[in-house]
Amino acid sequence: MQKRYLYAILFGIPGFFVTALLTAVLLGAAAGFLWLFVFGDSPWPETTQTLLPVAALAVFLAIWAGVVIRGYRYGKGREDGRPVERRHLLIAAGATLMPIVIVILHQYRVGNLGPPSDGERCRDYCKEQGYAQSGMPARDSGDRSCICYDKKGREVLKEPLDELPAGR
């Protein structure tokens, strides 16, 4: 395989993940700008539901294409008979794994991965028992229990958290 194609791949694969992460940040910044300075809390026009994702896709493709083209040109300049440097392969592997690890750690931190929180366990338990609402005492009270409420907001059931099923 010619180095121009190899380096296009070495730049392109990690570039895909880095560009996806960068595009998500830019999309959030654009939506935040529109919310703060243009539309506010008023209803947004329907066109923004189409334009924001289309703009994000265009930005993603433009940045990623630029990264792949840069890799192609870099590889083309290195086609002088020297072997591919091992350091470049390790950098590409690290640059591929880093954004993936960042996303996984973020999702774990916000609670989408890993064991459910006590509040989630309590909510699920009360919902399974057929109650309308759930709640828990203040954390610093020392009382580790789950309270289920009826539709009128009256306490109906109080169970220790240690006795609730594990959940997910």
Image (cartoon, grey):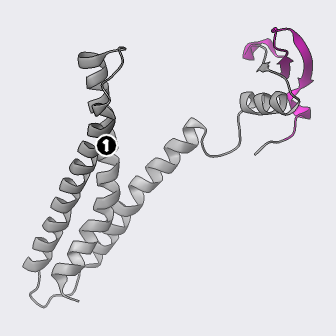
- Asked if residue 27 shows in the view, the reply is yes
Residue identifier under label 1: 53
Q: Give the side of residue 65 with respect to residue 166, left or right.
A: left
| Residue 93 x/y as whole percent | 37, 68
* Badge 1 element: helix
Q: Amino acid at mark 1?
A: Pro
Count of all numbered marks drawn on residues in the image: 1
Q: Nearer the viewer, residue 128 or 165?
A: 128
| Residue 73 x/y as whole percent | 10, 72
| Residue 118 x/y as whole percent | 75, 30
- Asked if residue 26 shows in the view, the reply is no
Q: Nearer the viewer, residue 119 or 57?
A: 57
Residue count near mark 1 (Cα–Cα under 10 Å), binned few <14, some 14–19, many ≥20: few
| Residue 85 x/y as whole percent | 24, 79
- Residue shown at 73% from the left, 17% from the top: 139
Range of magenta residues: 138-165
Q: Quadrant of the N terminus?
A: bottom left
**Quadrant in which residue 14 is drawn:** bottom left
**Quadrant in which residue 11 is drawn:** bottom left
Q: Give the side of residue 114 with respect to residue 93, left or right.
A: right
- Residue shown at 34% from the left, 35% from the top: 49
Image height of 142 relative to 78, above or below: above
Image height of 35 relative to 82, above or below: above
Image height of 150 relative to 108, above or below: above
- Residue shown at 34% from the left, 43% from the top: 24
Q: Nearer the viewer, residue 141 or 128?
A: 128
Q: Nearer the viewer, residue 115 or 127?
A: 127
Q: Is residue 158 magenta?
A: yes
- Residue shown at 33% from the left, 22% from the top: 44
Q: Is residue 35 magenta?
A: no
